[in-house]
Each structure stands twice: as structure tokens, then as C-alpha cells.
Amino acid sequence: MRYDWNLEEIREIHDMPLLRLILRASQVHRKHHNEGEVQCAQIINVKTGGCEEDCAYCGQSSRYNTHVVPQALLTVEDVLRDALKAKQHGISRVCLSAAWRGVRNGKAFDTILEMVRRVKELGVEVCCTLGLLQEEHVARLKEAGVYSINHNLDTSESYYNQIITTRSYADRLETIARVRNAGLSVCCGGIIGLGESLEDRLSMLQTLSSLNPHPDSVPMNMLVPIEGTPMAQQTQPSSWELLRMVATARILMPKAMVRLTAGRVKLSLAQQALCFLAGANSVHMGSQLLTTPNPEHHIDLEMFRTLGLTQQEPYTKDNTTHKPALEAIEEHMAKALNQRSQQGTLRKLAVSQDHVDLTSNDYLGLARSQELAYRIENEFHTLLSTTGIRPFVGATGSRLLTGNNAYVEALENELATFHGTESALLFNSGYTANVGLLSTVIGSEDTLILDTQVHASTWEGAKISGARQLLFRHNDVGHLAEQLRKATGRCFVCVESLYSLSGDIAPLDEICDVCDHYGARLIVDEAHATGIFGPEGRGIVSAHQLEERVFARLHTFSKALGSHGGAILGSSLLRDYLLNFSRPFIYTTAFPLHTLISIHCAYKMMREMGVERQRLQSLIQAFRAKVIDSQLPIKTTLTPIQTIGVAGVEAAKALSAKLAENGLDVRAILPPTVRRGGECLRVCLHAFNTVEELDRLVAVLSGESEQLFIA
Ligand code: SAM
Ligand code: SF4
């Protein structure tokens, strides 16, 4: 480690032939950092705008008339919610930023200290960037659990007063020294493109690398010109200039986390890749930095996959002084549950009241059918009296051991014939069928392209598969085509024919066309379509005669069929492959005979329920008409699933309770099942519902229409 680099040496490094500089920086980087590991930080602007300083680049200065709308200090809850979401995106450091000249004691600072305490409990590193700090502020921030303080030098000392006149370079250096003396991590970097000379840039690097110890992280910003600021007309520096600064900073400060931040949104994947090669190993994530745009999370996560980067865990670069001791698991569980209950989203089991069912997936009413129960018992007792089929109660083992029998094989053949496919393989649930298919057939060399609204079980299977995941906007075939063009390796596309939450139907014909065009294999989850769409309830793939063009289908028996389990339909080769390699199939006990009989009888009855299917369709039409007549803000669908957007968790719960008071069972769907802001009521219509019940439903909704919005 050197702290005495002189300007000539720094210029020599900076100006060397670029590829040699990148190579040199890359060698230094590999010696001090895990290859491909990138720290992902996220800024939360806890107090926006209205800053008394006159930083010429900054949209938050009250001296300039910019797009930034000043906002008061956020609440602790707001910050906690954003920090939690950031953590779920793999963020290891949350930066709380306030557009202040500096800290003053009082309520605002106390609130920030509380934010620090609560965000730290999430297990992420907490950084603060609050302007100038006195000793006592640093001490209180440390006591609250702050890990790092950001305080940028931004440019050279000689150029500083061209950019900022309301404070001096010495002010900044004093705060940095106080932070360091308190044993906190220092985050200190700068901006290029302020109109500075190359001399100024190198001099800034010289000051940074003369700090002993070096800053733990060095943000390297590219100016983002902001309308209304003195820098608005500056031309942005090129990515090559940034690359040289990153590589030089790496060589001068080998252990520092060199961060790409403002201006990164302008960099291509290749330009960012070069920066990572040259030693950048930290980024700010999140679609918005303080006042400048940033790549969306999913774009970054895709980049990480493409470049083979991993998100660094919190406290990786740290002595154990900051690392929070792992609390006892009981404490962790209690805290997590407490957090949920504070957010009003604690899950609890509830026994359904005797209300009108407008919520279950029993679309045809088979799950409550006496007729079906009678047929199952009848067939079961008939089998009890015959020899051959044994055992009657439990399957006694997995299918590959003692859990197989002639009955289940006949049932699978029957399903295959009915659904127009070569083979069917039963799984104990739709969930395990999705996981069992995706985690087995798809591997880390492959690309898996998912509609953003696929079911949790599909996400699970995708995660276990290790495939490169690309998302496409819900039902957006154009975006799917765009993503298909990026695919590498074998490519698979996963959609649902009828979406379990939004209730809308996938444009399967166009999706097949675009998959055929790019040679991708299409997987269709027909869980909610089975039994209610297609000839005799065969599903939507059959309704469009697409059986030959779909690689695999999932049908489940727990929705319209009123039974339990799922099956993967596809070629005989696929069946044999799953039977040999799918762990959720191999290592679990098979269905008991009674369940097999219930699936068999349900299928037979379902085929005869054309009248119920028709009745369900007319109820759907009736609901749609009533919504239009009553001018409710509901985007209705052509399916039994009608999702109604409600403004917030409490409102959704209250509306569900109000419907229950009116004898109607409609459940609220809350975070984390849906994203915050996506709270809704999920109404499910059934063949057994009546028009009077729909009238009651619409009447209650009309009374609360100000709570509703198009989800
Ligand atoms: N008030 C705090 C302070 O100035 O210490 C806020 C720190 S926040 C991290 C501000 C930093 O973001 C600046 O030091 C600068 O490096 C960067 N920044 C702000 N506006 C920018 C812009 N328009 N272009 C590039 N970087 C910018
Ligand atoms: Fe204020 Fe910080 Fe912006 Fe400067 S950079 S104007 S100190 S918010």
C-alpha cells in the first residue's frame, strides 16, 4: 500500500496504453479482491433538495431551479420498507443521504439515527452521507451502528472553488479525518466532467491515495448535467476517461472498493464490463440515484448473470468490529414475524367462514360435489373387493420403489390421451411439478425467459436450475422477442395460459410463433385453465391446437378438478428423463390409491360438465356487465379470476372484512405475495355462484369504490 504517489507517477499510470493499463489494474484487482464479486449499494434519499450549498453539479441545491422537488425527511418506516426491498435485491449496503450542508442536533438527526438502527437490523451495511460532521455526530452515528460515511472530495483542491464556494476542501478533509478517527469506514471519491483539467483529476486521485488508510470505497461519478445547474451545458466525459480513472484508482488504492455510480446508466454492458475488468467492484443499484437515473434492478441482475458477477455479502470487506453478531435463531424468527405484523402482512391460517365462496379455485364446484364423492367411494370400494391393486391406504414408497402400480400407469396414459400428448407424469402437487420440471431439464448453461407474472413455483424451479434468467413484461410478445435475441445456450420460455393472479390469458399463438422463430422451447403452466377452457376442459393449449408446439405443459388437479396433484405432459423422452433425473419426483412417496381414484373420477366428471363450464362463462359475462354498469374501476377479465386493485394493505383487509360482513368470502392478496402497491382483492367466480351474489359483491364494491383502482 502506498500513500505517497506523486503526480508524475500517477500521470504515467493514467496515460499508459489503455489495454496495458486495464491489464495492470486487473492484476492488482485480482490480488486483493474476489474475482467477479461486486458490492451492490443502494442510495435512499432521506431528505431531498433544498440544500443551502452551491455544488455546481447538484440538482438538490436550493440555489438552482432544477427538476428536483424538495421533500421533507422520510419516516423511519418509509426508509425501512425501501431498505428491505433493496436487501431482497441483493443489496449489501444501504446509503442514507440527506441534502444538507451538515448535521445539526435535533429531531431530524435523531430520526436518522433511528433509521440507522433499524436498517442495520436488516443485516446490511449502513452508510450515511449527511454533509459536514462534527466529532459528536460521528460518535452518535457510530453508536447507532453506522458502518461507513460517504463524503466526496469531488475534484482537485485547486479546482474545488470553481465548483463549490459555500464550503472549502479543508472542511471536507476535516470531516473525513473525524470519520476515520472514529474507526468508521470512509467512502470518498469524486466526479469527472466538471470542466476540470486532467491535472485536476490526477490531483484528486493523489489526494485520495494520500489518505492513510485509503478510503474503503471510492465512488467514481461521471457528471450527469442537470438542467438549471451551472453544469447543465457541460459535455459528459467519455467512458474511456472513466475507465482510465477507475483503473488508475485501482492501482493507487488496491484494497478500495471502486464504485461506478452517477452516469453508469449511460454505459453499455461492454463499457461496464471493461470497468469491472479494470478493477471496479462496486455499483449503486436502484432505478434512481439521488437526482440522476440509474439502471433498473433487473437490468443490473441480467448484467451480473451475463458477466458472471456475484453480489457481495455485507461486511465481507470488514474486520469483525462492525459485523453484527448472529442473533439466536429464536430472536431472528421473532423479529422477522414482528416486522411482518408491524407491516400488517403477518400470515395466519384461518378457517373459512360459512360465506359465499368467491375466493377458492374450485371453479366447477367439483371439490364440494357429492356426486364426485360418491363416485370416488364407489370406485374405491369396488377396488377393495378385487385382488391385484394393493396397497389401499398409503403408497408405501416412491414410484421407482413400491409406490408404482397398474392403476397410476393407466391413469397417466388416460391423461396423455385426453390432453393429446405422448406422455404424462404425475407429481404430488402443481408446485413440485413445476420445480421438478424446470430444475431438472434446464441447467446453468441455458437461458430461461419468464413472464414477470409466473407463479412462485416457476421462480423456485428457475432458481434451482441455475439458468440465466431473463424476464419479459407480462404478455408482451415484443419484449419476449427482444429477450430471445439475447438468449445464450438452450433457451426455454415459461408462461401461464391463464394467470393465477391477474386472471388474464397469454397470447399463446404469438408466443408459439416467436419461440419457433428463435428455436426456444415453450413451457405452459395450465394450472388454472385445466377443466374450464378448451374442448371438455382440456386447457387453452388444446383450445388453440398448439399441443405439438409446446415442449411441456403442467396441468393440476387441485383447481377446477377439485382433487390434488399435478402432471407434466410432454414427449415420452421427457417423461423418461424426468423419471430418471427429477429429484422432486424420485425422492418422494407416491400418491395413495384414494387420491389416484379421486383424480380419475374428477377427470371423468369434468368432461361431462359442459353445462357448468357454460354457466361459469355466463357468470363471468354477467360480472363484467355489472362492473361496467356500476362504473367500477376494475379491469375485468374473460376468466373466473377477477383482480381488484385496492389502495394499500389496510384498505384491502378492511374491504375483505366488509365483504365478509355481507356474507361474501373474498380474500385480500398482500405483500410479499404481491409487491407493495400491488395489494388487491382476488375474486374467483364459480359455476355454483348466483347472479344475486354478484349483485351483492358489486353493491359492496360500489360503496367502497374510492378505495379501488385498476391494478
Ligand atoms: N449532501 C451530501 C454531500 O454532498 O456530501 C450528499 C452526498 S451525495 C453522495 C452527493 C454526491 O453525488 C456528490 O458528492 C457527487 O459526487 C455526486 N453527484 C451529485 N450530483 C451529481 C451529478 N449531477 N452528476 C454526477 N455526480 C453527482
Ligand atoms: Fe448539497 Fe450534497 Fe448536493 Fe452539495 S452535493 S448541494 S452538499 S446535497
Image (cartoon, rainbow, N blue to C red):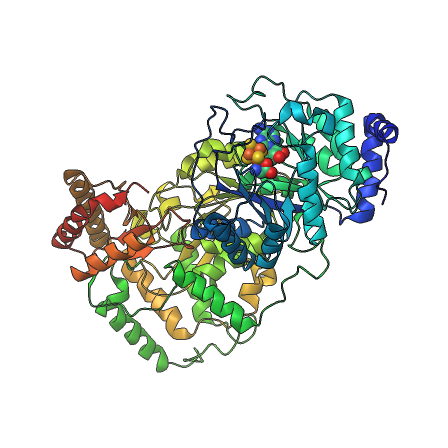
Extreme residue toward the left, this view: 692
Q: Viewed as shown, does residue 582 lie left or right of 197?
A: left
549, 122: nearer the viewer: 122
680 in relation to 285, above or below = below
Q: In which quarter of the image is the N terminus?
A: top right
Q: How many marks?
A: 0
Extreme residue toward the top, this view: 233
Q: Say whether residue 172 is visible.
A: yes
485, 170: nearer the viewer: 170
Residue 258 location, x and y as percent? 71, 40
392, 168: nearer the viewer: 168
Q: In which quarter of the image is the C terminus?
A: top left
Q: Ligand 1 is found in which quarter of the picture?
A: top right
Residue 673 found in image quarter? bottom left
Residue 519 location, x and y as percent? 56, 37
Residue 265 location, x and y as percent? 59, 31
Q: Say whether residue 571 is visible.
A: no
123, 104: nearer the viewer: 104
Residue 192 location, x and y as percent? 68, 27
At 43% from the left and 53% from the top, the residue drawn is 77
Q: Viewed as shown, does residue 617 lie left or right of 530?
A: left
At 54% from the left and 24% from the top, the residue drawn is 226
Q: Viewed as shown, does residue 443 lie left or right of 204?
A: left
At 28% from the left and 60% from the top, the residue drawn is 362
408 in relation to 546, above or below = below
